[in-house]
Image (cartoon, coloured by chain):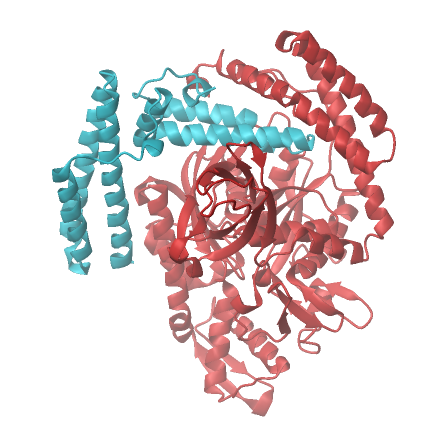
Chain colours: A cyan, B red
Amino acid sequence: MNYFELFSLPVKYCIVQSELSATYRLLQKQFHPDNFVMRADAQKRVAMQKSTEINDAYQTLKDNCLRAQYILLLQGLDIELDRRTLQDSDFLMQQMRWREDIELFTKDDEDAIDVFSNNIQDHIKALENTIESQLQQESLQATADSIIRLKFMLKLQTELSLIEETLFD
Amino acid sequence: MALLQIAEPGSSKAPHQHKLAVGIDLGTTNSLVASVKSGQAIPLVDTENNYLLPSIVHYGEMHISTGYTAEKNLLTDPLNTLFSVKRLIGKSFAEVDRTFLPYQLSAHESGTVQIDTRCGEINAVQASSEILKTLIKCAKKNLQGDLDGVVITVPAYFDDAQRQGTKDAARLAGVHVLRLINEPTAAAIAYGLDAAQEGVIAVYDLGGGTFDISILRLHKGVFEVLATGGDTLLGGDDFDVQIAKWIKEKANLVDPLSPKLQQELLKTSRKAKQVLSDQPNVTITLSQDNFSIVLTKIQFESLIAPLVKKTIRACKRAMKDANVALAELVEVVMVGGSIRVPLVKELVAAYFKRELLTSIDPDTVVAIGAAIQADILVGNKPDADMLLLDVLPLSLGLETMGDLVEKVIPRNTTIPVARAQEFTTFKDGQTAMLIHVVQGERELVGDCRSLARFVLTGIPPMAVGAAHIRVTFQVDADGLLNVSALEKSSGVQAHIEVKPSYGLNDNQVIEMLSASHSFAKQDLQARMLIEQQVEVKRVIENLTDALQKDGLQLLEQGEFDAINENMAILEKIGAGDDKQAIKEALKSIDKLTSHYASLRMDVSINKALTGHAVTDI
């Protein structure tokens, strides 16, 4: 049973988050180990495995980047295994510049950080839209490249929030 | 046997006998036990009508005492009167801050901290089990019967070693743990069910020794923890220590202080803190040299402000991790005895910009929530539509080259969760490998908590890099970690030897069990046999039932017959008293039926999702 089947969903990038979480709650209400504490040990184990799988599926399906990556995996393209590198020097240069920018932020740059953060968020949104249409056109290799770009952006976002944490806490 | 009994959606389960279950709040300063009686969760009282049991254990000349009886010995016998042992659970000797700790600590050969008493070396697990024994005795008396199970609460921010230590203490006390649940989550149950609350809530829990902040989404009976944070070494005790340090300085007391004087300073400081909750100042006196001094509320607040601010920083981080804005919160619930300090309430209200909810007694709310959950888990409320979804509080990682940590499971991931990681050999013919698991957020191994070192042995010898060892980290619903490993190309199950860094290993627990007064060795053997026979009975009942329902639909005739045959064998062996044979028979039927079990699970998932419009979930 793949994650989409587990949640009774067609294999599609487009997803309604509220429906996804409703199905998630319904599944966990039935299969969570809490329902099996008075059962035989082996039953407890199977319930834990199923509940684990439901959690994993939910984490994958609700996240735009992971969901896209999973769709590619179902089509036989494993990004992790591929260890593919991006042949886009402009994009990589831009990443390096951004990374240098965030290193230089100080406590007085609160406004600048906001602008920067919004800019990153816009790039993320744009990439997600690209991924959606690339998946529709079934251009798998192009989607894979976009996913890697998206991963770069998400990593940058995490780093920015870590820097914010150290500056303002 | 791996079959699941799943009620058909919409159909109710069979009627059953009422079971006895309790919730236990095993606190740093006070502990208590609660249970659902006539539909109402209430704290259970002892013969003197007290529901709070001070978490103090006295190892006396003649016998061990706990609670108020033990408390009387704090000043007269400080070396043998153990308090705040919760702070020592799952800790190494080197990690423990020994300022103002009147009793004597030493290190077990494993590095685990222990206390030297007149009854020999006592570890925190043993001392905690004494407190649990007292609470269980009180519960049995109240409920008039043996307990079918208990839920024990732990700080949400407890790491793996601390959780395992708590479970070991329960095992020593001889009770069946249904589940370890997090203290703030328990408080949320007590509040949430009370008001049929919906929306996102924050639970701020400042106890005697620990601090937790949890952000939860409540939706139609589901309590989903979005993020949690905290500090397992920050609580009311630390406020006392701040005052004690201040007095020490003002009274020109020089180290080393006698154990008795340390205890007097702590006791006086605690009293002063309590007075300052509603007075502008307090006069502090010491028996030594007729010393006397006034401490104002303002001075006290400046002493503890850095600590309280630390809790606010943790709140900010948790809100960020939960991805929730302040305006989205519908409630901020305050839990724990230390929220009585006015500065705490003031700063928390200022940060969350709202009034705080304290309507349930902050000392009992956690035990009450645990009692409600215990009642449901044990099966007394088959129609209860409640579910807890908790998270892993601290990231789990592995040591890699250069003392760096590679994160395997990030913090705030919903449990149960499993992640696999692949390793390969770095030498020709290598057959063993050492894996070091750590818990924490920092990048360097030395800055994280060392949980365990796993030695993988039995890797088939191959050329360098040819072996692919898949190590799976499984965190169960109690938040406890299990590790398994498999060499992929050969399918060989690599053997894992677990060495908990600062906990007790299985042999130590069994040793303690057999050494404890509550079970003679024979009792233990007899108990293990009975447990196995109960398991055989469960397996046969569940399996017969399942086979009748859908055995022939899901299985080939051959498989069906094989299972029936094995079941008959199991029944025969289960009637005897050969523990090893029963164990093997259970194992073999488990293996034989695991495919059938997952088939049934998939069928029931399809059933669960059809006939339900998502809108009525």
Q: Position of residue B583 (x, y in %)?
A: 76, 34
In this rendered view, identify the residue nearer to me: B422 or B430.
Answer: B430
Left or right, A24 with reference to B564: left
Q: Residue furthest bottom?
A: B289
Residue B535 visible at all? no
Left or right, A71 with reference to B38: left
**Where B529 sits versus B230, above or below?**
above
- Which residue is found at the position 41% from the left and 46% from the top? B407
**Where B326 sits versus A130, above or below?**
below
Residue B605 visible at all? yes
Q: Position of residue B457 (x, y in %)?
A: 58, 45
Instruction: Quadrant for residue B301, please give it.
Output: bottom left
Left or right, A160 with reference to B40: left
**Where B88 sits versus B576, above or below?**
below
Instruction: Quadrant for residue B112, please give it.
Output: bottom right
In this rendered view, identify the residue nearer to me: A51 or B197.
Answer: A51
Instruction: Quadrant for residue B558, please give it.
Output: top right
Q: Residue furthest left?
A: A90
In this rendered view, identify the residue nearer to me: B475 or A72.
Answer: A72
Q: Position of residue B556 (x, y in %)?
A: 65, 9
Q: Position of residue B230 (x, y in %)?
A: 44, 54
Quarter containing the N terminus of chain B: top right
**Where B220 sits versus B482, above or below?**
above
